[in-house]
Image: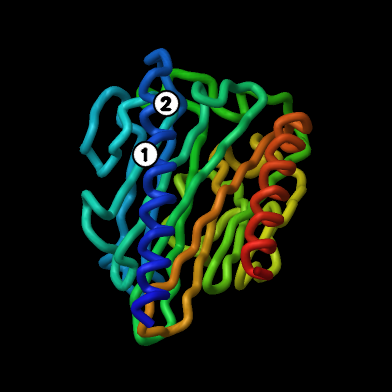
Amino acid sequence: MFENLAIKEANVLKKLSLLVIAGILLLSLPKTVSAVAMITLVELGNPGSQITITDNVGIIGVSGDQDPTPGAVSFSSVVSGAIGAWNINVEFGITNPVLPAPPIKMDLLSLNLSTSPVETTIVIAFTDDGTGPDGLLPSWDDMTAPGLHGLAALVGGTTDGIVQYDIHNSTIPFGNSHDATGTLITESPDLGPGAFSDTRSGLVDFDANGTWLTQIIAITHQGSSLPQISSLDSFVGVPEPATLSILGLGLAGVGLINRRKRTR
């Protein structure tokens, strides 16, 4: 049991190191005006655990954002404290101008560890509307022509439990509930346990349904005396096939590596 625990702790430290490196690289990017972005986390059934992190341009620590880079939102429970039974949560979302728009692109890296004798679910939402912290930048609907637009997304990673992945479109900031109202664009089947990847597509109409675009991830871990870990990368574009193809190859490689490890 202690050997398995040590392996899990080593894997967590490795993944945390990779996210820290990514954050350092982003800090070297030019500091330009950003699209607004928010990450919301909540343990399902525990509304008091909810926290929302907003993109604080050039400011570290306000509202929990630990990356001053415009267009990057970072959160670590190591700094801010656990969210219910979820002892470790590291979230790193990037959007415009780190991923320049148009076309619209949003990417979320997520690492989550729970320790609970009973089943527990955490919901993570990464949302953006494109208007920037001062509300003066073009919104997603201003960047796109009226009518329907193709949307494509990829999600992949590894989990000790089950992952659900939804993409929504709404008229208000949206991300504090897995069952919140809004226009559902696409949703995945249950993913996991183990290595997983899934490709989603759909149609979005920013003028008709609202300018907020949100990725929602719900991670469920079964009760266990050992830590349970899930890590993933989710990307959505409206649309950019080349970017999606590159990310798809990356996710396929992650899945292949993890399958090989599990068969040894």
Q: Residue at x 22, y 37 (%)?
A: 62
Quadrant in which the N terminus appears: bottom left
Q: Residue lying farthest front?
A: 264
Crowdedness of circle 1 by 10 Å Cα count: few (<14), some, many (20+)?
A: some
Residue 187's place in the image compared with 253, above or below, is below
Residue 36 picture quarter: top left
Callout 1: SS: helix
Q: How is the image coloured?
A: rainbow
Q: Which of marks 2 and 1 is nearer the N terminus?
A: 1
Quadrant in which the C terminus appears: bottom right
- Badge 1 is on which residue? 20
Identify the mark at residue 240; answer none if there is no mark.
none
Q: In this view, does 81 lie to the left or right of 156?
A: left
Q: Callout 2, which amino acid? A: Leu
Q: Which residue is drawn at 52% across and 66% down?
A: 179
Residue 95's place in the image compared with 175, above or below, is above
| Residue 14 horizontal/vertical position (percent) | 41, 50
Q: In this view, does 251 lie to the left or right of 23?
A: right
- Badge 2 is on which residue? 26
Q: Which residue is drawn at 39% across and 58% down?
A: 12
Closer-to-camera residue (134/126): 126
| Residue 35 horizontal/vertical position (percent) | 46, 26
Q: Which residue is drawn at 56% across and 47% down?
A: 170
